[in-house]
Image: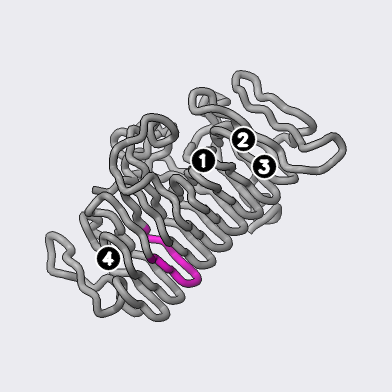
Amino acid sequence: MRRSAWLRVVLGVGLLGGFGVAAALPVGALTIPGTTATFTPLGPGTPGPAICTGTDAAPGQLAGIYPNGVVVFGTCWVNGGVAQVEGNLTVEPGSTVNASFALNDQAHGVGQSALYVSGDINVYANGTLILGCEPKASPCTDDPAAASGGTLSSMDVVGGSVVASDALGVIIHDSIIGGDVTQLGGGGGVSCQPPASGPFAAMHSPVFSDLEDNWIVGSVTLAGLQTCWNGALRNYVGGDFTNVGNVFADPDANEVLSNVVQGDLACASNSPVVQYGDSHASPDRVGGNATGECSFFTYQPDPPGPPMPVSVPG
Protein backbone atom coordinates (compact mmCIF):
# COMPACT_ATOMS: atom_id res chain seq x y z
CA MET A 1 0.00 0.00 0.00
CA ARG A 2 1.37 3.43 -0.88
CA ARG A 3 2.03 5.41 2.28
CA SER A 4 2.15 8.90 0.78
CA ALA A 5 -1.65 8.99 0.62
CA TRP A 6 -1.66 9.27 4.39
CA LEU A 7 -0.36 12.81 4.20
CA ARG A 8 -3.28 15.08 4.53
CA VAL A 9 -2.63 17.26 6.80
CA VAL A 10 18.31 28.44 -8.13
CA LEU A 11 18.08 29.67 -7.17
CA GLY A 12 18.84 32.28 -4.72
CA VAL A 13 17.35 35.73 -4.87
CA GLY A 14 17.16 35.91 -8.67
CA LEU A 15 14.98 32.84 -9.04
CA LEU A 16 12.97 33.64 -5.95
CA GLY A 17 12.28 37.08 -7.30
CA GLY A 18 10.92 35.41 -10.40
CA PHE A 19 8.26 33.80 -8.25
CA GLY A 20 7.03 37.23 -7.20
CA VAL A 21 8.09 36.90 -3.57
CA ALA A 22 6.98 39.84 -1.47
CA ALA A 23 7.46 39.55 2.29
CA ALA A 24 8.51 41.57 5.31
CA LEU A 25 12.08 41.33 6.56
CA PRO A 26 12.28 40.31 10.24
CA VAL A 27 14.41 42.76 12.18
CA GLY A 28 15.40 41.75 15.69
CA ALA A 29 13.06 39.52 17.62
CA LEU A 30 9.68 39.01 15.96
CA THR A 31 6.57 37.26 17.25
CA ILE A 32 3.66 36.67 14.89
CA PRO A 33 0.35 37.45 16.59
CA GLY A 34 -1.75 34.40 17.39
CA THR A 35 1.21 31.98 17.30
CA THR A 36 4.05 30.92 19.57
CA ALA A 37 6.68 31.56 16.89
CA THR A 38 9.67 33.67 17.84
CA PHE A 39 12.54 34.57 15.52
CA THR A 40 15.67 35.98 17.13
CA PRO A 41 19.05 36.70 15.50
CA LEU A 42 21.88 35.06 17.44
CA GLY A 43 23.30 38.08 19.26
CA PRO A 44 22.73 41.82 18.81
CA GLY A 45 24.66 43.26 15.91
CA THR A 46 25.99 39.81 14.95
CA PRO A 47 24.50 38.35 11.80
CA GLY A 48 23.27 34.86 12.50
CA PRO A 49 20.44 32.51 11.70
CA ALA A 50 16.93 33.16 12.87
CA ILE A 51 15.44 30.70 15.35
CA CYS A 52 12.00 29.15 14.92
CA THR A 53 10.49 27.28 17.86
CA GLY A 54 7.15 25.62 18.49
CA THR A 55 5.40 22.42 19.49
CA ASP A 56 3.14 19.95 17.71
CA ALA A 57 0.16 21.55 19.46
CA ALA A 58 1.32 25.13 18.85
CA PRO A 59 3.74 25.12 15.89
CA GLY A 60 5.94 28.08 15.12
CA GLN A 61 5.51 29.92 11.82
CA LEU A 62 8.08 30.47 9.11
CA ALA A 63 7.08 33.44 6.97
CA GLY A 64 8.96 36.36 5.44
CA ILE A 65 12.62 36.78 4.50
CA TYR A 66 15.49 35.43 6.59
CA PRO A 67 18.81 36.80 5.29
CA ASN A 68 21.10 34.60 7.43
CA GLY A 69 19.43 31.20 7.46
CA VAL A 70 17.07 29.54 9.93
CA VAL A 71 17.50 26.98 12.71
CA VAL A 72 14.41 25.04 13.82
CA PHE A 73 13.94 23.72 17.35
CA GLY A 74 10.65 21.88 17.83
CA THR A 75 7.88 22.13 15.23
CA CYS A 76 7.53 24.88 12.62
CA TRP A 77 5.03 25.22 9.78
CA VAL A 78 5.12 27.18 6.52
CA ASN A 79 1.45 28.19 6.30
CA GLY A 80 1.62 31.97 6.61
CA GLY A 81 2.65 32.88 3.07
CA VAL A 82 6.06 32.60 1.43
CA ALA A 83 9.09 31.88 3.61
CA GLN A 84 12.36 32.81 1.89
CA VAL A 85 15.52 31.55 3.59
CA GLU A 86 18.80 32.94 2.27
CA GLY A 87 21.42 30.44 3.34
CA ASN A 88 20.74 27.15 5.08
CA LEU A 89 17.71 25.76 6.89
CA THR A 90 18.71 23.47 9.77
CA VAL A 91 16.24 21.05 11.35
CA GLU A 92 17.70 20.20 14.74
CA PRO A 93 17.40 16.69 16.30
CA GLY A 94 13.80 15.72 16.98
CA SER A 95 12.44 18.80 15.21
CA THR A 96 9.97 19.13 12.33
CA VAL A 97 9.45 21.44 9.37
CA ASN A 98 6.10 21.01 7.64
CA ALA A 99 5.95 22.92 4.34
CA SER A 100 3.00 21.02 2.86
CA PHE A 101 0.54 23.92 2.90
CA ALA A 102 -0.89 25.58 -0.20
CA LEU A 103 -2.75 28.53 1.32
CA ASN A 104 -1.82 31.43 3.58
CA ASP A 105 -3.80 30.16 6.53
CA GLN A 106 -2.70 33.07 8.72
CA ALA A 107 -4.51 35.37 6.29
CA HIS A 108 -7.61 33.17 6.31
CA GLY A 109 -6.61 31.34 3.16
CA VAL A 110 -5.87 34.44 1.09
CA GLY A 111 -2.66 33.97 -0.90
CA GLN A 112 -0.27 31.06 -1.15
CA SER A 113 2.38 29.48 1.06
CA ALA A 114 5.72 28.08 -0.11
CA LEU A 115 9.27 27.58 1.15
CA TYR A 116 12.28 28.84 -0.80
CA VAL A 117 15.78 28.06 0.54
CA SER A 118 18.81 29.35 -1.36
CA GLY A 119 21.25 27.04 0.45
CA ASP A 120 20.94 23.56 1.92
CA ILE A 121 18.38 21.90 4.17
CA ASN A 122 20.05 19.78 6.85
CA VAL A 123 17.89 17.38 8.87
CA TYR A 124 19.43 15.78 11.93
CA ALA A 125 18.61 12.73 14.09
CA ASN A 126 14.88 12.03 14.47
CA GLY A 127 14.04 15.20 12.56
CA THR A 128 11.25 15.33 9.99
CA LEU A 129 11.07 17.31 6.76
CA ILE A 130 7.87 17.59 4.71
CA LEU A 131 8.28 19.64 1.51
CA GLY A 132 5.62 20.32 -1.08
CA CYS A 133 2.23 18.77 -1.76
CA GLU A 134 0.09 17.79 -4.73
CA PRO A 135 -3.29 16.22 -5.52
CA LYS A 136 -3.66 12.45 -5.23
CA ALA A 137 -0.03 11.57 -4.39
CA SER A 138 0.19 13.80 -1.31
CA PRO A 139 -2.65 16.29 -0.73
CA CYS A 140 -1.79 19.56 0.94
CA THR A 141 -2.36 19.72 4.68
CA ASP A 142 -4.80 22.62 4.29
CA ASP A 143 -6.57 21.40 1.14
CA PRO A 144 -10.32 21.39 1.88
CA ALA A 145 -10.71 18.50 -0.57
CA ALA A 146 -7.79 16.44 0.83
CA ALA A 147 -10.02 13.53 1.86
CA SER A 148 -11.07 12.99 -1.76
CA GLY A 149 -7.58 13.47 -3.24
CA GLY A 150 -7.25 17.25 -3.16
CA THR A 151 -7.05 19.96 -5.79
CA LEU A 152 -4.30 22.25 -4.46
CA SER A 153 -0.54 22.05 -4.82
CA SER A 154 2.52 23.85 -3.47
CA MET A 155 6.00 23.71 -5.01
CA ASP A 156 8.98 24.35 -2.74
CA VAL A 157 12.46 25.26 -4.01
CA VAL A 158 15.85 24.41 -2.51
CA GLY A 159 18.87 25.92 -4.23
CA GLY A 160 21.34 23.55 -2.58
CA SER A 161 21.00 20.01 -1.27
CA VAL A 162 18.74 18.19 1.17
CA VAL A 163 20.89 16.15 3.56
CA ALA A 164 19.25 13.97 6.23
CA SER A 165 21.38 12.13 8.79
CA ASP A 166 19.46 9.58 10.89
CA ALA A 167 16.27 11.57 10.25
CA LEU A 168 12.88 10.21 11.22
CA GLY A 169 11.28 10.94 7.85
CA VAL A 170 11.87 12.93 4.65
CA ILE A 171 8.83 13.51 2.40
CA ILE A 172 9.32 15.67 -0.70
CA HIS A 173 6.69 16.22 -3.39
CA ASP A 174 6.40 18.49 -6.43
CA SER A 175 9.57 20.41 -5.54
CA ILE A 176 12.82 21.60 -7.13
CA ILE A 177 16.14 20.63 -5.53
CA GLY A 178 19.18 22.35 -7.03
CA GLY A 179 21.68 19.91 -5.52
CA ASP A 180 21.48 16.39 -4.12
CA VAL A 181 19.00 14.53 -1.95
CA THR A 182 20.82 12.35 0.58
CA GLN A 183 19.16 10.27 3.30
CA LEU A 184 21.56 8.23 5.43
CA GLY A 185 20.18 5.97 8.14
CA GLY A 186 17.24 6.85 10.31
CA GLY A 187 13.56 6.05 9.95
CA GLY A 188 11.03 4.90 12.51
CA GLY A 189 12.38 1.35 12.79
CA VAL A 190 11.21 -1.75 10.96
CA SER A 191 7.60 -1.30 12.04
CA CYS A 192 4.34 0.00 10.62
CA GLN A 193 2.87 0.84 14.02
CA PRO A 194 1.91 4.55 14.09
CA PRO A 195 3.87 6.39 16.80
CA ALA A 196 2.19 7.85 19.86
CA SER A 197 3.52 11.37 19.33
CA GLY A 198 5.18 13.59 16.77
CA PRO A 199 4.35 14.53 13.17
CA PHE A 200 3.38 11.03 12.06
CA ALA A 201 1.06 10.59 15.04
CA ALA A 202 -0.70 13.78 13.89
CA MET A 203 -1.13 12.17 10.47
CA HIS A 204 -2.31 8.89 12.06
CA SER A 205 0.38 7.25 9.97
CA PRO A 206 3.32 4.91 10.39
CA VAL A 207 6.68 6.56 9.81
CA PHE A 208 7.72 6.66 6.15
CA SER A 209 9.80 8.57 3.61
CA ASP A 210 8.93 9.47 0.04
CA LEU A 211 10.17 11.33 -3.06
CA GLU A 212 7.58 11.95 -5.77
CA ASP A 213 7.26 14.27 -8.78
CA ASN A 214 10.41 16.28 -8.04
CA TRP A 215 13.07 17.88 -10.21
CA ILE A 216 16.42 16.99 -8.59
CA VAL A 217 19.40 18.51 -10.38
CA GLY A 218 22.02 16.44 -8.55
CA SER A 219 22.07 12.86 -7.28
CA VAL A 220 19.88 10.85 -4.90
CA THR A 221 21.25 8.55 -2.20
CA LEU A 222 19.03 6.44 0.06
CA ALA A 223 21.13 4.22 2.32
CA GLY A 224 20.64 2.44 5.64
CA LEU A 225 17.04 3.56 6.12
CA GLN A 226 14.85 1.42 8.41
CA THR A 227 11.20 2.38 8.41
CA CYS A 228 7.71 1.26 7.39
CA TRP A 229 7.61 2.35 3.75
CA ASN A 230 9.72 4.25 1.24
CA GLY A 231 9.07 5.21 -2.36
CA ALA A 232 10.62 7.25 -5.15
CA LEU A 233 8.31 7.80 -8.11
CA ARG A 234 8.23 10.07 -11.17
CA ASN A 235 11.32 12.09 -10.24
CA TYR A 236 13.83 13.66 -12.63
CA VAL A 237 17.35 13.02 -11.31
CA GLY A 238 20.20 14.79 -13.10
CA GLY A 239 22.94 12.69 -11.51
CA ASP A 240 23.09 9.16 -10.08
CA PHE A 241 20.51 7.33 -7.97
CA THR A 242 21.83 4.98 -5.25
CA ASN A 243 19.40 2.87 -3.21
CA VAL A 244 21.28 0.46 -0.93
CA GLY A 245 21.01 -1.29 2.43
CA ASN A 246 17.47 -0.23 3.32
CA VAL A 247 15.03 -2.35 5.36
CA PHE A 248 11.27 -1.73 5.32
CA ALA A 249 8.48 -3.33 7.34
CA ASP A 250 5.84 -3.07 4.62
CA PRO A 251 6.27 -5.87 2.06
CA ASP A 252 4.97 -3.42 -0.56
CA ALA A 253 7.72 -0.87 0.13
CA ASN A 254 10.68 0.18 -2.03
CA GLU A 255 8.76 1.31 -5.10
CA VAL A 256 11.56 3.12 -6.99
CA LEU A 257 9.96 3.50 -10.41
CA SER A 258 8.94 5.86 -13.21
CA ASN A 259 12.03 8.00 -12.57
CA VAL A 260 14.24 9.57 -15.21
CA VAL A 261 17.86 9.13 -14.07
CA GLN A 262 20.49 10.77 -16.24
CA GLY A 263 23.39 9.00 -14.53
CA ASP A 264 23.65 5.51 -13.04
CA LEU A 265 21.00 3.67 -11.02
CA ALA A 266 22.30 1.21 -8.40
CA CYS A 267 20.04 -0.81 -6.07
CA ALA A 268 21.40 -3.49 -3.72
CA SER A 269 20.94 -5.20 -0.35
CA ASN A 270 17.42 -3.88 0.19
CA SER A 271 14.56 -5.69 1.94
CA PRO A 272 12.23 -5.92 0.19
CA VAL A 273 13.96 -5.50 -3.15
CA VAL A 274 12.82 -2.78 -5.54
CA GLN A 275 9.40 -3.78 -6.86
CA TYR A 276 6.26 -2.53 -8.58
CA GLY A 277 3.91 -3.47 -5.75
CA ASP A 278 0.61 -1.67 -6.32
CA SER A 279 2.23 1.47 -7.78
CA HIS A 280 0.96 0.90 -11.37
CA ALA A 281 4.20 2.62 -12.38
CA SER A 282 6.50 2.24 -15.37
CA PRO A 283 10.18 1.25 -15.51
CA ASP A 284 12.87 3.76 -14.58
CA ARG A 285 14.54 5.33 -17.61
CA VAL A 286 18.30 5.37 -17.03
CA GLY A 287 20.89 7.22 -19.09
CA GLY A 288 23.87 5.40 -17.56
CA ASN A 289 24.23 1.93 -16.09
CA ALA A 290 21.50 0.18 -14.10
CA THR A 291 22.72 -2.48 -11.69
CA GLY A 292 21.55 -4.88 -8.99
CA GLU A 293 17.86 -4.91 -8.13
CA CYS A 294 17.29 -2.15 -10.69
CA SER A 295 19.24 -3.58 -13.60
CA PHE A 296 17.97 -3.63 -17.16
CA PHE A 297 17.71 -7.41 -16.86
CA THR A 298 15.69 -7.54 -13.61
CA TYR A 299 11.98 -8.18 -14.05
CA GLN A 300 9.35 -7.83 -11.32
CA PRO A 301 5.60 -8.58 -11.25
CA ASP A 302 3.50 -5.57 -12.27
CA PRO A 303 -0.12 -6.54 -11.50
CA PRO A 304 -2.41 -6.99 -13.29
CA GLY A 305 -0.10 -7.35 -16.29
CA PRO A 306 2.99 -9.47 -16.98
CA PRO A 307 6.38 -8.94 -15.27
CA MET A 308 8.17 -5.77 -16.37
CA PRO A 309 11.81 -4.67 -16.29
CA VAL A 310 12.59 -2.40 -13.36
CA SER A 311 14.71 -0.18 -15.61
CA VAL A 312 15.13 0.49 -19.32
CA PRO A 313 17.83 2.46 -21.16
CA GLY A 314 16.81 5.97 -21.98
- The reply to whether the C-beta atoms of the residues labelled 2 and 1 are less than 8 Å apart is yes
- The reply to whether the C-beta atoms of the residues labelled 2 and 4 are less than 8 Å apart is no
Give the labeled residue for mark 1: 99
Please identify the quarter of the rendering in which residue 60 is found.
Answer: top right
Q: Residues within 10 Å of mark 3 (few under 14, many from 20)?
A: many
Task: Give the distance between the C-alpha atoms of the residues marked 3 and 4, in whole angstroms.
Answer: 39 Å
Front residue (pair 184, 78): 184
What's the colour scheme?
one colour
Residue type beneath disc 3: Val
Residue 46 appears at what percent x and percent y? 84, 41
* Residue 212 in view (yes/no): no
Find the magenta span and give its range.
232-244
* Residue 60 in view (yes/no): yes
- The reply to whether the C-beta atoms of the residues labelled 1 and 4 are less than 8 Å apart is no
Please identify the quarter of the rendering in which residue 21 is found.
Answer: top right
Q: Secondary structure at mark 1?
A: strand
Reply yes or no: does residue 237 show up in magenta.
yes
